[in-house]
Image (cartoon, rainbow, N blue to C red):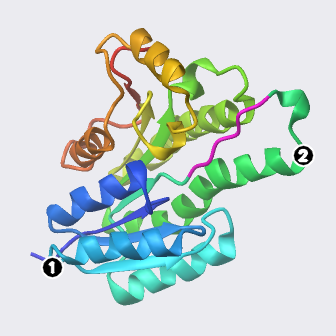
Amino acid sequence: MPRKTILITGASRGIGKAIAIKFARENYNVAISCISREKSLLEVKKEIESFRTPCLAFLGDAGDMKQCETMFSEIKRCLSAPEVLVNNAGISYIGLLQDMSFEEWNKIIHTNLTSVFNCCKLAIPDMVSKKQGKIINISSVWGNTGASCEVAYSAAKGGINAFTKALAKELAPSNIQVNAVACGAIDTEMNQFLEESERASLINEIPVGRLGRPEEVADFVYNLSQENSYLTGQVIGLDGGWM
């Protein structure tokens, strides 16, 4: 049986890296991308290949359609068209909206939301032709509830949630499932800015009493990628009971 191919954007670290390693262990062809961390991306590629798994690493901006077109062309040439797409690329901005520049706003929307449109648009035709596919968007609890001082990030993640629900309805007749994982506080580099007291206070708010691990997100994403064809259009919280 031929290997399936997965594409994970934002895969040089954290959740994206954990998802890539999980699927490599499960015998998938793995394509990974990030915008600038070439050294880290190549280290992930090397780790994936240690499982005797073919891997394509692409350095580029998933929010730029031209670069996405090049990436998908390379994936299809070197591996095969992705049967699983995980839209994970994302950046954050902490600060008051009134202090945020137009350029900073555009960068958040470009990276966190436009990238999802680009990759879905390019992945869908091959999925439709095969009458199967899984699209999994990595969202956030802030897309559901909103976060003070993270207005642009919350707006982008809220957009991903609505995008997920709408696209799922559009693609359901073609046997393509679209879901999102609304992550809570996951122990990644994105949260390293927290002071020790802030981290302790955050953990105190989470009923399970700890931050989530990237590997837990990866396991959940893998489970979503498997055979269940009735689960679609859902934004599923993975937050330790926080929200």
Q: What is the x, y in percent for residue 180?
A: 43, 38
The quadrant in which the C terminus is found is top left
Is residue 123 located in the magenta-colored stretch of the structure? Answer: no
Given residues 97 and 26, the one toward you in this image is: 97
| 82 with respect to 74 (left or right) | left
| 116 with respect to 225 (left or right) | right
Q: Name the residue under label 2.
A: 102
- Whether residue 225 appears in this view of the structure is yes
State how many labels appear: 2
| Image quarter of residue 19 | bottom left
Q: Which of marks 2 and 1 is nearer the N terminus?
A: 1
Given residues 125 and 135, the one toward you in this image is: 135
Q: What is the x, y in percent for residue 198?
A: 53, 20
Measured in 3D between alpha carbons, the distance from the residue under mark 2 to the one under mark 1, in whole angstroms, is 45 Å
Specify start and end residues of the magenta stretch as a single range.
90-95
Q: Residue shown at 44%/69% (left/top)? A: 40
The quadrant in which the N terminus is found is bottom left
Given residues 119 and 9, the one toward you in this image is: 9
Q: Which residue lies furthest to the bottom in this view?
A: 77
Q: What is the x, y in percent for residue 17?
A: 36, 58
| Mark 2 surroundings: few (<14), some (14-19) or many (≥20) residues within 10 A | few
Q: Name the residue under label 1.
A: 52
Local SS, label 1: loop
Q: Residue shown at 36%/73% (left/top)? A: 43
Local SS, label 2: helix
